[in-house]
Amino acid sequence: TASVGAILAILWLVGDSVDAQMVAIAFVVCIAYAVVAVNYSAQTAMVATSVVLIQSLTYPDPEQLAFARWIDVLIGCVVGTVFAFVIPLWKREALAANSASYADLVANWIHTIGDAVRAEPEQRAAKLAEVRQAGTRARDGRQVAITTFNTAMLEPPTDQLDTGAVGVVLSWIRRASDAAIAAETILRHDWPTTPVAAELADATEADLRQAAVVMRSEDYSAELDAQLSRPTALARKSIDEPTGDRVAALMARAEVSASAALRASHQVVLNS
């Protein structure tokens, strides 16, 4: 609108003089470059003004051209608003859903690790194959969640979802998955482990599944949530008093990360 007003004023002042119009164009371009570091909107308006003035040199009705460009800008604003504020709402819903799915996939992965720890030696190979498959699905789920998160970070904020909190949750879940990678590697090398590792895997799985429930805005037990939001005594003991069971130590750190992800998940969905 400001550009249209400036264009009409300049055209009225210069009349039919091409030389005067060229001087006006040069003046507007100089202003556009002068304000580029100060105000992007003003710079854009000046550039639009100079472009229309240049086009008007060969256009029979410059005023009509200015109003036509004004209508184009209004249509562009409507389209831009739809793409900037309406469509991202769908992406935000997908962000919470994809993050919850990622938490569930890592929970499934750690569940299979617990099963592998409990398995008899002759069943260990089959269980480790399941661990590998679950790990592949978890990594695929992480890629989907991260891609959706990066897209949402470029969009305007909303009052339904805290994108920054999602980033925190994804970071904690990734730490749990990093521990799962290391635990899987150790199990493949037949490192001795104890049932403590399986217990810690169960606790980690419960934390991650609860985080997924919270991010989906599903009903849950507040008492259970409060219990799961704190690392278990067994996890703290495994970290503070290492016993040489490397899988248990990794699962303890995974449980601490999963409980942190659960706490952060309560900040994801706003006004819930």
Image (tube, helix red, strand yellow):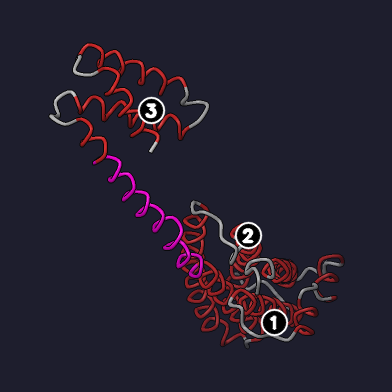
| Magenta extent | 68-94
Choose between 53 and 158: the one closer to the eye: 53
Amino acid type shown at disc 1: Asp
* Residue at (34% x, 48% y) in the render: 74
How many badges with numbers are in the image? Answer: 3
* Circle 1 SS class: helix
Measured as percent of width and height from the top left, residue 19 is found at 22, 11
For the residues labelled 1 and 3, the Cα–Cα distance comes to 63 Å
Residue 160 found in image quarter: bottom right
Image position of 214 (left or right of 28): right
Residue 174 sits above or below residue 230 on the image: above
User: Mark 1: few, some, or many residues within 10 Å (few <14, many ≥20)?
Assistant: many
Is there any visible trace of residue 179 in the rendered image?
Answer: no
Task: Work out which quarter of the rendered image holds the C terminus and state it.
Answer: bottom right
Image position of 136 (left or right of 261): left
* Residue at (23% x, 32% y) in the render: 63
The residue identified by callout 2 is 171
Image position of 41 (left or right of 221): left
Is residue 86 a member of the stretch shown in magenta? yes
Choose between 146 and 152: the one closer to the eye: 152
Query: Looking at the image, is mark 1 or mark 3 earlier in the sequence?
Result: 3
Mark 2 and mark 3 in contact? Answer it, CB < 8 Å: no
Residue 212 found in image quarter: bottom right
Amino acid type shown at disc 3: Met
Q: Nearer the viewer, mark 2 or mark 1?
A: 2
The residue identified by callout 3 is 46
The residue identified by callout 1 is 202
Q: Nearer the viewer, mark 1 or mark 3?
A: 3
Q: Nearer the viewer, mark 2 or mark 3?
A: 3
